[in-house]
Image: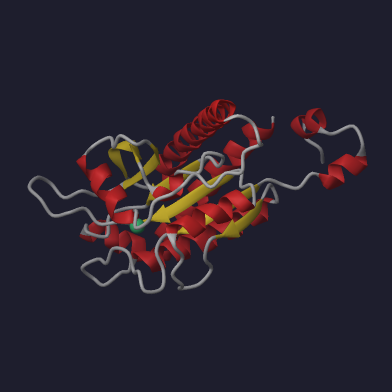
């Protein structure tokens, strides 16, 4: 049955409808292969948690039939950060969601636990954000965009407009993800953070990096080992992504 939204958004001809592909969501399970990511005290590897959640999330999203889904890796293989980003750009992804479960450096004060979400900023929101971004960024990024052959000045303007649109999209996706995840799993007190992760740097792809919890925290590690907890994270992210896409096409 057609909803009011789909009626309003319906193109004029059926032929046009056939040509318009569903938006693509690129899921990016962090690490892989020779790079295990963080490792918890019980031996839980970040790369495995990330892939498990990504596969469940893909299933959730595909069941909804609202979007196409691609993964930057579907097995335990190493994929450079830049290649992950370029995959999202090459397929004109509507959104890139990178999945992680990192470790906080040991230090004074209470243990850090709970989920959090990152969007791009060259100025980290705090020391934890800076440290995490540094540990993820093995490589740097050169923009990777083919701009039309106009003057460098005009290119700069186009690029900054594009970055602005992308930033607005990323921030909206983060707000939705914080709302949905916050109902499902414990989050940090200030769950929306900003840092310069490489996978967030495409000027043309709104992107979100999800830290699903800290493997350095025994309670978080135990939770992330439970399929039910991972399914709750995937379901919450699927709801957030659907809400993001609904508004994006409205
Ligand atoms: Zn990570």
Residue 247's x, y, as percent?
63, 31
Q: Kindly identify the residue that appears in the image at 20 percent across and 41 percent down.
A: 127
Q: Kindly identify the residue that appears in the image at 54 percent across and 56 percent down.
A: 57
Is the residue 63 above or below the residue 46 in the image?
above
Number of marks: 0
Residue 153's x, y, as percent?
55, 26
Residue 142's x, y, as percent?
46, 47
Is the residue 168 above or below the residue 52 in the image?
above
Please tell me in which quadrant of the rendered image residue 80 appears. Answer: bottom left
Quick check: 221 left or right of 60? left
**Residue 92 appears in view:** yes
Residue 231's x, y, as percent?
47, 58
Please tell me in which quadrant of the rendered image residue 248 appears. Answer: top right
Q: How is this picture coloured?
A: secondary structure
Seen from the viewer's position, the closer of residues 157 and 247 is 157
Please tell me in which quadrant of the rendered image residue 59 appears. Answer: bottom right
Quick check: 11 left or right of 230? right
Q: Kindly identify the residue that appears in the image at 44 percent across and 69 percent down.
A: 78
**Residue 226 appears in view:** no
Q: Quarter of the picture for ligand 1?
A: bottom left
Quadrant where the C terminus is found in the figure: top right
Q: Residue furthest front?
A: 151
Quadrant where the N terminus is found in the figure: top right
Quick check: 183 left or right of 135? right
Quick check: 153 left or right of 15? left
Q: Residue furthest left?
A: 108
Seen from the viewer's position, the closer of residues 5 and 160 is 160
């Amino acid at each position: 049955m057609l909803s009011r939204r789909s009626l309003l958004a319906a193109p004029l001809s059926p032929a046009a409808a056939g040509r318009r592909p569903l938006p693509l969501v690129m899921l990016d399970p962090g690490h892989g292969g020779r790079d295990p990511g963080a490792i918890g005290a019980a031996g839980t590897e970040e790369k495995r948690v990330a892939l498990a959640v990504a596969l469940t999330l893909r299933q959730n999203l595909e069941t909804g039939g609202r979007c196409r889904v691609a993964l930057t890796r579907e097995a335990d293989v190493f994929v450079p950060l830049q290649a992950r980003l370029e995959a999202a750009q090459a397929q004109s992804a509507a959104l890139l969601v990178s999945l992680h479960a990192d470790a906080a450096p040991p230090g004074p004060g209470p243990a850090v636990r709970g989920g959090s979400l990152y969007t791009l900023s060259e100025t980290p929101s705090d020391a934890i954000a800076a440290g995490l971004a540094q540990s993820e960024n093995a490589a740097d990024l050169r923009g990777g965009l083919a701009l039309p052959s106009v003057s460098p000045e005009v290119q700069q303007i186009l690029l900054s407009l594009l970055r602005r649109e992308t930033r607005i999209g990323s921030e909206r996706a983060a707000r939705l993800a914080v709302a949905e995840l916050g109902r499902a799993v414990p989050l940090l007190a200030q769950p929306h953070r900003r840092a310069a992760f490489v996978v967030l740097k495409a000027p043309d792809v709104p992107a979100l990096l999800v830290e699903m919890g800290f493997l350095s925290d025994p309670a978080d590690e135990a939770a992330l080992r439970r399929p039910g907890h991972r399914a709750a994270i995937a379901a919450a992210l699927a709801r957030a992504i659907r809400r993001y896409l609904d508004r994006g096409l409205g």
